Image (spheres, helix red, strand yellow):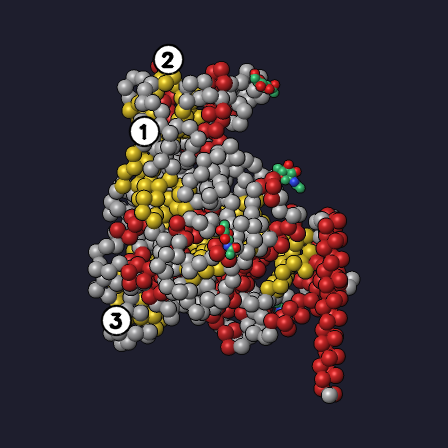
Amino acid sequence: MKALNQLMDILHLKLSLITYLLVIACLWSILAQQLGAAIWSTNHEVYVVYMGHHGDVHKDIVVNSHHELLSSVKESHEEAAMSMIYHYKHGFSGFSAMLTAQEAAALSSRREVVSVFPSRQKSLHTTRSWEFLGIEDTLSSQAMNFDHNMRNASNKNRTLRELANYGQNIVIGVLDSGVWPESESFSDHGMEPVPPSWKGVCQTGDAFNLSHCNRKLVGARMYIKGYEARFGPLNVSGTGEYRSVRDKDGHGTHTASTAAGREVAHAAAFGGFGAGTASGGAALARLAIYKVCWPLPGESPTGDNTCGDADMLAAFDDAIADGVNVLSVSIGSGNPQPEYFEDSIAIGGLHAYRHGILLSCSAGNAGPKPGSVSNVPPWLLTIAASSVDRTFSAPIELGNGQILEGQAVTPSVLRPSFYPLVHAADCLLSNSSIDATSPEASQCLANSLDPVKTKGKIVLCMRGVNARVEKGWEVLRAGGSGMILANLPSNGAEISVDAHMLPATAVPSDIGEEIIAYMRTTRVPKAKLVPPHTYLGVKPSPFIAAFSSQGPNSVTPFVLKPDISAPGLNILAAWSGDNGPTKLEFDKRRVKYNIYSGTSMSCPHVSGIAALLKEIHPMWSAAAIKSAIMTTASSVGSDGKVIRAASGEVATPFLMGAGEMNPTLAADPGLVYDIELNEFCDFLHSVGYNHTLINIIIGSYPPCQKLHRVKTSDLNLPSVAVDLSTFPAIRVSRKVKNVGIGRSFYTASVKAPSGIKVEVEPSRLTFSHYGQSRRFWVKLALSEERTHVHDPYAFGSLTWSDGLGHNVRSPIVVQTK
Ligand SMILES: *[C@@H]1O[C@H](CO)[C@@H](O)[C@H](O)[C@H]1NC(C)=O
Ligand SMILES: *[C@@H]1O[C@H](CO)[C@@H](O)[C@H](O)[C@H]1NC(C)=O
Ligand SMILES: *[C@@H]1O[C@H](CO)[C@@H](O)[C@H](O)[C@H]1NC(C)=O
Ligand SMILES: *[C@@H]1O[C@H](CO)[C@@H](O)[C@H](O)[C@H]1NC(C)=O
């Protein structure tokens, strides 16, 4: 009886606590409605308080510790509860909250806190819709679909995909703008039941109910609290965005289907271009969608999305607990790059790594600027973008009979006859504020063209300033019949194809010059746009896209980034059913598949392959999978020559990392460079983190109890980057693990960077069984001749070969000045 009374007491207590919380919640929601986000707007910001590994204690204890900590800098527990946004408690510990700068400073001095940083907005890594002349970035695009990649590999009896059962036991988590669940790419027809280890959920919302998840789309969650705390409530009517996992934008649908879309025959972007079988890298892998990107308020007309650290960390925290096997994140920070522990992708990636999850992410589209690469921590796999062997040939015939090559994927085709050809600068509205002699005059900016001068003509527009598709819209608005879009010299020969809203052909800058030269020779210039055709097998391919961000790594120079390159130029994949292919608000067309470009598109190619490798080798660590992908990459193109940049120059490891991914070889790399967690502790120590901090981040029991004094360059990566600018010689250590046949014998060969002496000790390695590790050292020394070279970097490679087809290649980068 007494026990019962006690129980009643406890229940009562609990009930009154619940009532109390309910009252608080009600009051809060009324208050929030009244004041909106304005209550915080004056001096509060969304901050992330990162507290490292959670020590494997019960989640309630973790949550309580967050409340205690936050309350210690707030007036009351109630205020603390109201300012809390997210608790991070599964994969790691921390929270996000509305804080003043003073509160943030107070929290950051606390012993248990690793870092406190404002939640920054990141962007999706498609080639952005806007070009900024004279600023660091140039845009671009080109195309491919997975089968081309696979075709190279068909020399073995079973393809990698077959060997891996198309990845059916693997879950790929995608942090992006959501998903369009009705796309055929996400059909679960004929798929096996969801793997029992999967613990994720299907979160319902606007136009998204439980029936939208299936055996392909096994998880769906959305994260908007950080966004709304910063920008106010999502403007559903103004943006057309769904308050659910449903993807209005198209980007998330595109990346998810590239990683793990089903095979869909006869998929084509607008009217047949790029037609073929669309298939993700791991066609039977499961997808878990984490929607973290939302429309940037006030952005128009192409409405770029924004993704905040606070929301992304919540997604990483859940994804780790849900049981994803691979994470695909086509998102990154603008430059300068954040510190590792002030960056949601770096933090999420490290804790994912601890759980055996590889995080594959985009290098960014800030190329060809050196040092622009994003997502640089060594535990991430960072992907550059390359072209594929496909072209969308659409020649232009000029009035003088000259035929010039261009590219197009525009569906509607002009009558193939001559039209008057006119330069955009000659079509300016007479009252336009644009100076007719300025570069902007020829760029077809919004509302700049005079319908009287444009009507019925083909207009030559130059790239720069506004979106490529917006130029097409402007010509159409002014009554033009077609457009020729010419690259600027800084865009080189790299052609971006877009679903322009009128017939439009894109040409390299030199062809643009030829057209202008022709127009000077005649009083009645005219041109004919030839309907486009798709050609495959274009050589040489690939080349590295000009937009792809480049090394060196601006945070840790002696960790090479990017790691690898994969197709990211003109990629065909599934699209949102609620956005036009150009994303322009005037574009009412709807397509099931769309062509897009960016390292956003190359990242999921690698995520899909990582899923296949994980299926074949379930016990491999994230580092082993990364190593297999990198050491089997190709540094030569289809013409047998070294891969080039879009500019025609040789692509160094700063552009392509280890080279172009070669999926089939990656399944059987022979040796891998594995990394134990404690080696990351030593690495963090080498870049300046102290013992206390490392213990909080990674956890104090075995992994980080003892730190070893190592050089940053000693981290066991499948690439070598060293500094010979201050010391004339260095010796770095590496360890390889045998994952091939038991007994094997490898010999080192080196392509020494120019002016650098390289010795490998020992230069032969013998393995007697699977899983055995061997250590070796690489000595690099400056030679006399190097002192006369101006270039501060030299590039080479190290390859271990067993003579039986395993060539385990690592790029070498040496800084000499
Ligand atoms: C989910 O929504 C679809 C329409 O999109 C509808 O046909 C279906 O009945 C709904 N299912 C459930 C379980 O509500
Ligand atoms: C929502 O967006 C529309 C269109 O951009 C705008 O007119 C409206 O003022 C916005 N509403 C709010 C609450 O910001
Ligand atoms: C310029 O002229 C066009 C048409 O002649 C007119 O529609 C537009 O409003 C004018 N713009 C300005 C800024 O006067
Ligand atoms: C470790 O580094 C942190 C942050 O830089 C600092 O606050 C702390 O005092 C350091 N601890 C020790 C033992 O040096």
Residue situated in front as seen by the camera: 561 or 392: 392
Identify the element where label 3 is drawn. Answer: loop
Q: Amino acid at mark 2?
A: Val
Mark 1, mark 2: which one is toward the viewer? 1
Mark 3, mark 1: which one is toward the viewer? 1
Q: Is residue 330 left or right of residue 742?
A: right
Say if residue 776 shows up in the picture: no
**Residue identified by numbered label 2:** 524
What is the x, y in percent for residue 798?
A: 32, 59
Mark 3 vs 2, N-terminal side: 2
Farthest bottom residue?
A: 1
User: Does residue 645 sit above or below 490 in this rendering?
Assistant: below
Say if residue 700 shows up in the picture: yes
**Residue identified by numbered label 3:** 741
What is the x, y in percent for residue 403?
A: 28, 24
Mark 1 vs 2, N-terminal side: 2
Q: Amino acid at mark 1?
A: Pro
Query: Which of the labelled discs sits on residue 531, or is there none?
Result: 1
Q: Residues within 10 Å of mark 3 (few under 14, many from 20)?
A: some
Q: Quadrant of residue 361?
A: bottom left
Residues at circles 1 and 2 in contact by the CB criterion of under 8 Å: no
Farthest right residue?
A: 75
**Distance between the Cα atoms at labels 1 and 2?**
23 Å
